């Protein structure tokens, strides 16, 4: 086929692809159990038995097919008794006598032998339940990294893919009065078509890293609810009832502090939508005034509740408007790792507060990029409470299989899970659909589809992606042009730029850089940074990994940033050092990415004050 014909067909594909893919509805998520962390829960945190299964004998026999009796960790067999009573019986596992670990926690910290374990681990515990007639029960998981296979009393209740989003399975009818056994097979292995692909610049914390709870609801309950302030100044509610009484069910929204009560009736599908003018007394949420309101939706015997802030976020030209006024997002990026020498990604309210207080109080920031995946709901609720705007993202990271339809389906489902869990979190301002992804027609179609899904699921927030930027020399000047073909699908442009760290640029040259864009949209520097080992000093200030170089890198980059006319925010990389297997310099890194402004234990480096002073001075 002639080259011109190939190019024409490629262009045609690119033009048609979004339309073809766009026709499909947004990925369904059920049950949503919105704000399920606030429902009556039996918290299953605590001691669980665990058993490694690197060759997945518990999932399949040695010729394929079902696993053998002696390998099915999810069975309810009392192995000790079975082998005692029948000397010929052969079991090659025994969960009740397996080691124990305290969950939620990544298995990397269960013991030293697990530090580099990748693959399948079985977890099991027993718990007492009291299921009552007319109620429904769900097992809700904050996150399981990467695949979860869930069994209750020896029966499969479902499987889930994705290491960072909340999911639930209904277990009504499977739950027994008295003792029950839950078994979870957790597989951390990822293939090139998974999200993220196997190569990332962060540690794979395999395991059950967030809370597991047993949620109880009435027979008909509020499965999804979204309450927010629309850009035209109304309080909006969208609720979905689930159960026999859903169709035509009566609902009442109440915000007592505003004296607001709104009655409604669900349609035949159990959906209720209503809009009312916002009461004059409404105090809008902002980083300076992080006002949250108790909100309930009563539907029959169910009372759904949440704590919600009301604000608007929009783009006007190249400005970002918070509550109608231009705002500069003065932030920092961070991974989901608690402070400490041996993090396990178990984010308690205390851990979240410690991290975000460093942003708010330490750096005088108003914004945080929660990279590179949806963080714990503990973290997003803490951002609501402390008053930090949030960039939230799904792990569409680096070399994703953009031409694989299953990968796209996984991404769409992951995005829907993220948004449906968190769209009542007022702190979240931006949904991001990608990070440093190589440009291609397939990538543009894939990310455009995600951007359209994000807008369809949530018309109150902004959509962005962390892009790379083109660079040319023009008459001796370095010109950076922000013109990624994805930008028309985004509300906010964002680029990661590491001039002077990953490039041979002299720090003194950065101020002369020229930044341009053919698009009139706000720009965020979604990453820039340099590494330093806390306590490493260099009188010449020239050597990388010294605190002095990192501090000078920040001074030079902030000077460059202040000269970008359409820059509306930044989230330098990164608040604290974090684990990354890609970083193995034996003196400076030892398996840690050292671009933190603080060490892993929270020791502030010189550059911390450089950024803090900059924000205090330029964006108070
Ligand atoms: C990239 C990437 C980060 C990574 C950082 C680095 O921009 O987005 O995940 O950690 O650079 O190189 O430190």
Image (cartoon, rainbow, N blue to C red):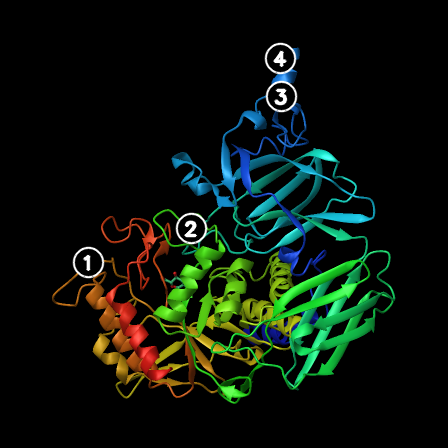
Q: Quadrant of the C terminus?
A: bottom left
| Residue on which the image places disc 2 | 203
**Residue 134: assigned label:** none
Q: Earlier in the sequence, mark 2 or mark 1?
A: 2
Q: CA distance from mark 2 to mark 1?
A: 24 Å
Asked whether 147 or 442 is in front, the reply is: 147
Query: Do the numbered discs 1 and 3 sit on residues whose CB atoms are within 8 Å?
Result: no
- Lower sequence index among marks 4 and 2: 4
Q: Which residue is mark 4?
A: 84
Mark 3 or mark 2: name the one nearer the start of the chain. 3
Residue 301, x across and y down, in percent: 80, 58
- Relative height, residue 309 to residue 185 (above, below): below
Q: Secondary structure at mark 2?
A: loop
Residue at left offset 25%, top offset 74%: 505
Quadrant housing residue 15: bottom right
The residues tagged by marks 3 and 4 sit, at their Cα atoms, a distance apart of 8 Å
Regarding residue 585, the answer to whether it shows in the image is yes
Circle 4 SS class: helix
Q: CA distance from mark 3 to mark 2?
A: 35 Å
């Amino acid at each position: 086929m002639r080259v011109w014909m190939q190019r024409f067909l490629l262009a045609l594909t690119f033009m048609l692809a979004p339309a073809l893919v766009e026709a499909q509805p947004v990925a369904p998520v059920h049950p949503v159990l919105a704000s399920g962390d606030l429902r009556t829960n039996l918290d299953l945190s605590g001691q669980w038995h665990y058993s490694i299964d690197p060759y997945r004998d518990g999932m399949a026999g040695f010729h394929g097919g079902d696993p053998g009796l002696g390998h099915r960790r999810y069975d309810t067999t009392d192995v000790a008794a079975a082998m005692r009573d029948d000397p010929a019986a052969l079991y090659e596992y025994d969960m009740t006598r397996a080691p124990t670990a305290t969950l939620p926690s990544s298995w990397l910290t269960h013991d030293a032998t697990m530090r580099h374990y990748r693959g399948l681990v079985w977890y099991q515990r027993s718990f007492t339940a009291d299921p009552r007639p007319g109620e429904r029960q769900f097992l809700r998981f904050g996150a399981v990294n990467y695949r979860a296979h869930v069994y209750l009393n020896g029966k499969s209740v479902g499987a889930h893919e994705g290491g960072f989003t909340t999911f639930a399975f209904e277990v009504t009818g499977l739950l027994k009065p008295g003792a029950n056994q839950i078994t979870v097979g957790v597989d951390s292995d990822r293939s090139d078509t998974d999200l993220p692909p196997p190569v990332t610049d962060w540690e794979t914390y395999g395991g059950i890293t967030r809370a597991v709870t047993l949620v109880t609801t009435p027979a008909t309950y509020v499965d999804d609810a979204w309450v927010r302030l629309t850009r035209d100044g109304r309080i909006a509610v969208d609720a979905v009832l689930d159960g026999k009484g859903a169709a035509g069910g009566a609902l009442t929204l109440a915000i007592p502090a505003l004296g607001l009560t709104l009655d409604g009736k669900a349609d035949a599908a159990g959906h209720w939508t209503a809009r009312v003018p916002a009461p004059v007394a409404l105090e809008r949420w902002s980083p300076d005034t992080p006002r949250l309101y108790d909100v309930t939706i009563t539907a029959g015997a169910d009372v759904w509740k949440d704590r919600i802030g009301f604000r608007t976020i929009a783009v006007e030209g190249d400005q970002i408007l918070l509550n109608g006024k231009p705002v500069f997002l003065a932030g920092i990026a961070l991974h989901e790792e608690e402070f400490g020498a041996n993090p396990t990604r178990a984010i308690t309210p205390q851990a979240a507060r410690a991290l975000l207080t460093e942003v708010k109080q330490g750096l005088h920031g108003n914004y945080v990029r929660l990279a590179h995946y949806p963080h714990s709901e503990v973290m997003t609720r803490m951002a609501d409470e402390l008053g930090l705007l949030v960039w939230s993202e799904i792990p569409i990271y680096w070399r994703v299989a953009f031409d694989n339809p299953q990968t796209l389906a996984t991404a769409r489902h992951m995005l829907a899970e993220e948004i449906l869990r968190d769209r009542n979190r007022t702190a979240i301002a931006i949904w991001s659909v990608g990070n440093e992804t190589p440009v291609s027609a397939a990538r543009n179609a894939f990310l455009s589809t995600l951007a359209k899904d994000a807008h369809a699921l949530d018309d109150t927030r902004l959509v962005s992606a962390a892009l790379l930027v083109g660079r040319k020399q023009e008459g001796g000047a370095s010109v950076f042009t922000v013109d990624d073909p994805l930008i028309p699908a985004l509300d906010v442009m964002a680029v990661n730029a590491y001039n002077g760290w990953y490039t041979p640029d002299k720090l003194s040259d950065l101020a002369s850089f020229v930044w341009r864009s053919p698009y009139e949209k706000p720009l965020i520097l979604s990453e820039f940074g340099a590494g330093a080992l806390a306590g490493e000093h260099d009188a010449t200030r020239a050597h990388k990994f010294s605190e002095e170089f990192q501090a000078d890198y920040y001074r030079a980059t902030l000077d460059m940033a202040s000269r970008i006319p359409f820059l509306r925010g930044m989230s330098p990389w990164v608040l604290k050092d974090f684990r990354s297997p890609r970083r193995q310099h034996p003196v400076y890194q030892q398996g840690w990415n050292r671009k933190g402004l603080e060490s892993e234990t929270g020791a502030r480096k010189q550059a911390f004050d450089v950024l803090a002073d900059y924000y205090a001075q330029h964006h108070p």
